[in-house]
Amino acid sequence: MRWKGRRVSSNVEDRRGGGGAKAGGISILGLVVAFVAWKFFGVDPQQAYQATKQVTSHSQVAETQGLDNPTPEQQEAMDFVGTVLADTEDTWTQVFQQQLNSQYVAPKLVMFSGVVNSGCGTAQSAMGPFYCPTDQKVYIDTAFFKDMRQQMGITGEQNTTELSRQDQAGDFAQAYVVAHEVGHHLQTLLGISEQVQKARAQSSEVQGNQLSVRQELQADCFAGIWANHNQQRTQFLEAGDVEEAMDAAHKIGDDYLQKRSTGQVVPDSFTHGSSAQRMQWFQTGLKSGQINDCDTFNQTI
Ligand SMILES: [Zn+2]
């Protein structure tokens, strides 16, 4: 993926701190509830936060500042995320104008390490990246991208020698994760998240999970739309990039994660969609570039 030399967003907040945030004020009860909720709900922690919000909203995590002297690697991680965020800003501003005749309002993105205060409660890096609709911010933990390569094996290494992309192995998969979280921001702007939340309040757990899957698949489809238009704007894709994102979509599908953790697949508890579904909806957005084609709520998924 080509990303150097483009605009870097000014909407990135650096809260990586020096050596990790202090979890000073978190109550033990809050931590226990957060942990149980995280285990119960899986990787995307939105529901976990709702469950823990009441408990943790009174406690405070010491606010951390950005790194004083970032290493070149840390600076590069910041520049990369800032460039991807700027790409989403420029792309969605254009697409909102053209397809919806409305103005895009960009989210902020918080880079953190360890523990962070969000408008949705206190979050820990173990929960993975997330979007908080209350403060309209995307939260990305610096360790996540590293974990993503190591634990999930998203390395892109099969392509690196021919394409000499050693330094940027897995970069498009990482951009895809940022674009997916920005996809949840779009759902907030478009009023979709609110509708889903209302519908979930009146449905069974199984139905609620199905709604959650449709919401997640739409965020994947929006990430595909972003890739389509960003390609037209910047020609940023390189050979192997889409396969890399597909590989990521495969590895972060619920069935893959469940199989790895429990050895069996229980579709009713899926909250993100299967690997095949995630790949399919990313492709749908990528091919069409049209918001209307991402109506995962009224189409067969
Ligand atoms: Zn998501």
Image: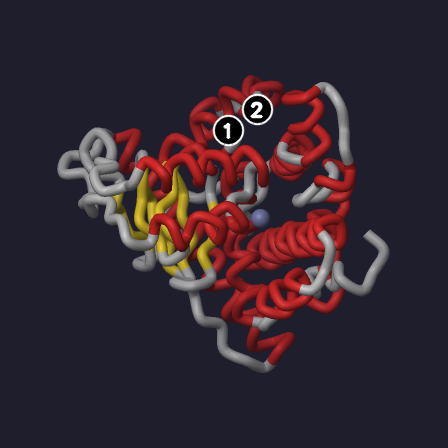
For the residues labelled 1 and 2, the Cα–Cα distance comes to: 5 Å
User: At 38% across and 63% down in the image, what residue appears?
Assistant: 135
Determine whether the residue tagged by mark 2 lies in a helix, strand or loop: helix
Q: CB of mark 1 within 8 Å of CB of mark 2?
A: yes
Q: Pointer 2: residues within 10 angstroms few (<14), some, or many (20+)?
A: few
Residue 226 position within the rendered picture, expressed as x and y whole percent measured from the top left: 59, 56
User: At 54% across and 33% down in the image, what residue appears?
Assistant: 39
For the residue marked with disc 2, what is the amino acid? Met
Q: Nearer the viewer, residue 168 or 265?
A: 265
Q: Which of the numbered marks, if any, corresponds to residue 152?
A: 2
User: Is ligand 1 within 8 Å of the beta carbon of the residue shown at mark 1?
Assistant: no
Q: Which of the numbered marks, if any, corresponds to residue 281?
A: none
For the residue marked with disc 1, what is the amino acid? Met
Is residue 205 positioned above or below 142 on the image? below
Q: Which of the numbered marks, if any, corresponds to residue 148?
A: 1
User: For this view, does 237 lie left or right of residue 286?
Assistant: left
Q: Is residue 8 visible?
A: no
Is residue 193 positioned above or below 282 on the image? below
Residue 17 position within the rendered picture, expressed as x and y whole percent measured from the top left: 21, 38
User: At 37% across and 37% down in the image, what residue appears?
Assistant: 31
Q: Pointer 1: residues within 10 angstroms few (<14), some, or many (20+)?
A: some
Residue 40 position within the rendered picture, expressed as x and y whole percent measured from the top left: 58, 37
User: At 40% across and 48% down in the image, what residue appears?
Assistant: 139
